[in-house]
Image (cartoon, rainbow, N blue to C red):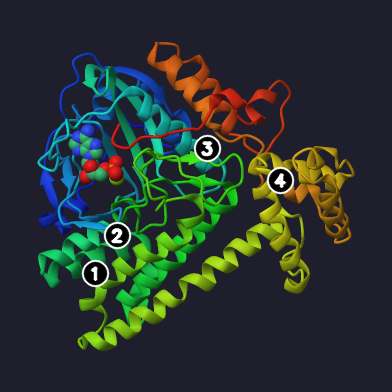
Amino acid sequence: MSIASPTTVVLGTRYARELPEMAVAWQAAEPPEPRLLVLNDRLATELGLGPDWLRTPDGVGLLTGTRLPAEAEPVAQAYAGHQFGGFVPRLGDGRALLLGELADGRRDLHLKGSGRTPFARGGDGLAAVAPMLREYVISEAMHALGIPTTRSLAVVATGRQVQRETPLPGAVLARVAASHLRVGSFQYARATGDTGLLCRLADHAIGRHHPQAAQGQRPYLALFEAVVAAQAALVARWMLTGFVHGVMNTDNMTISGETIDYGPCAFLEAFDPATVYSSIDHAGRYAYGNQPVVAEWNLARLAESLLPLLHDDQEQAVELATQALNGYRPQYAQAWSQGLLTKLGLPADTDDATVSPLVDELLPSLQESRADFTTFFRALAEAARGDIDPVRRLFLDPEAIEAWLTRWRALRPDPEAMDRVSPLYIPRNHLVEEALTAATEGDLDPFSRLVDVVRQPFTQRPGLERYAAPAPPDFGAYRTFCGT
Ligand code: AMP
Ligand code: MG
């Protein structure tokens, strides 16, 4: 593989060229004292960007958007979005920039925290070190868990202070995504009333993500169906892993089906569908258990945006969109129940009439016992191997769970298959906080160790016991924040 040097980095301008109405040419702010905090060597190598070169001043210049190839045209992307249900017609990259598409043309290189743009509204355009490292470690964990996600390439400290509740060290995150097209991008195009723009946006999305949609009779309906399928699969993966996104506004939902925007997200510990971590989600709109219906609601907003492209007759367009949207629930249900079956170690063809009663009993008792979701499934694999004690200890009513285990073990669950899909190591909220606090004080070791651990989530390794354990009781209720 050829390794990039300053002269060979290719940053495509396809988005900017094809959708100029949704791109504002903009430059990143110059960081006073850039210092590379973390570089994703593996991802860099995969992208043909030499890690050694990325560590040089020119490389750090690429990672902060301040030394770009001459042909690059960095832009702030325009989008709209429903935030907590209320429509905002103009959001856009307030503190982010699309540097361009990388050499294969299928991945965006993008910055977060690179300075104010015309979309900044009241914001300062900046980001602090800890939240950018948070996005780095959680997106790496998601990737290792096999959940589609944007990737983090690097975090560079800027040497600039960022004023939050207190002054904090600032940073820029360089991230890579299949694209940064969101449901909100379509809402923006639709709200302009320019059907030509909407059409170009849909063609761009089809070309990048769902090229097979172009083959059929109704490419735009096929695009919508492909997004429905991708999101049903994605949200099922979140639910099966206990991931709580925390801010599923339509501007934070991708067309590619990748998880995006790791602001107030967190991983579930005690199983409870009402779990909310975000400090601003007072009504629990984005609670763990609401995520599947919120995704459907967001997809309905995408459908509305696409209506002018679906049929000349808008009544028929609504009919087509509704039919396609009706596919979401069965697809989600199928992905969830298949996933759960695998987590229970049972073959995919296990009779539903056998499994449903087991699941219907299990989830309420997990909730009642406030059992740790991640610990439970690994303990269950131990039970499949013959040691039921780790499971028993998690439940308030050991006799009831023993009876359940007896019925389940009669189905001959496969513990190896279970361990392949249920992680032992997730980015536990207390460990993330511990690592970020140390990093803010200048010690990156706990952060690097945590990244190493979550990159191999399924394989047990000696000495990592504390990474597999839930938060100690004195950690208290966990709260997360947006726009940090
Ligand atoms: P989020 O909920 O984090 O996805 O952000 C929602 C919107 O707020 C996006 O348009 C962001 O670009 C913008 N935003 C968030 N934080 C800042 C900031 N510090 N400065 C400027 N814009 C911001
Ligand atoms: Mg966002």
Residue 454, quarter of picture: top right
**What's the distance in space between the residues labelled 4 and 1, CA to CA?**
40 Å
- Which is in the foreground here, disc 3 or disc 1? 1
Residue 106 shown left or right of residue 239 in the figure: left
Q: Amino acid at mark 2?
A: Val
Whichever of callouts 3 and 1 sits on the residue coming sooner in the sequence is 3
Image quadrant occupied by the N terminus = top left
Residue 452 in the image: state x and y as whole percent: 56, 26
Q: Which residue does the image show at 86% across and 43% down from the upper left?
A: 388
Of the pair 453 and 473, the residue shown nearer to us:
473
Residue 219 in the image: state x and y as whole percent: 32, 76
> Looking at the image, do the residues carrying marks 1 and 2 touch, with CB atoms under 8 Å apart?
yes
**What's the distance in space between the residues labelled 3 and 1, CA to CA?**
33 Å
Q: Amino acid at mark 1?
A: Ser
Q: Amino acid at mark 4?
A: Phe
**What's the distance in space between the residues labelled 4 and 2, CA to CA?**
34 Å
Q: Which residue does the image show at 14% across and 39% down from the upper left?
A: 120
Q: Is residue 156 visible?
A: yes
> Can you identify the residue that label 2 sits on?
183
Whichever of callouts 4 and 2 sits on the residue coming sooner in the sequence is 2
> Can you identify the residue that label 1 sits on?
305
Q: Alpha-carbon neighbours of circle 2 within 10 Å: few (<14), some, or many (≥20)?
A: many
> Can you identify the residue that label 3 sits on?
141
Quarter holding ligand 2: top left
Tell me: residue 1, above or below residue 213: above
Q: Alpha-carbon neighbours of circle 3 within 10 Å: few (<14), some, or many (≥20)?
A: many
Secondary element under disc 2, as helix, strand or loop, is: helix
| Tag of residue 366 | none
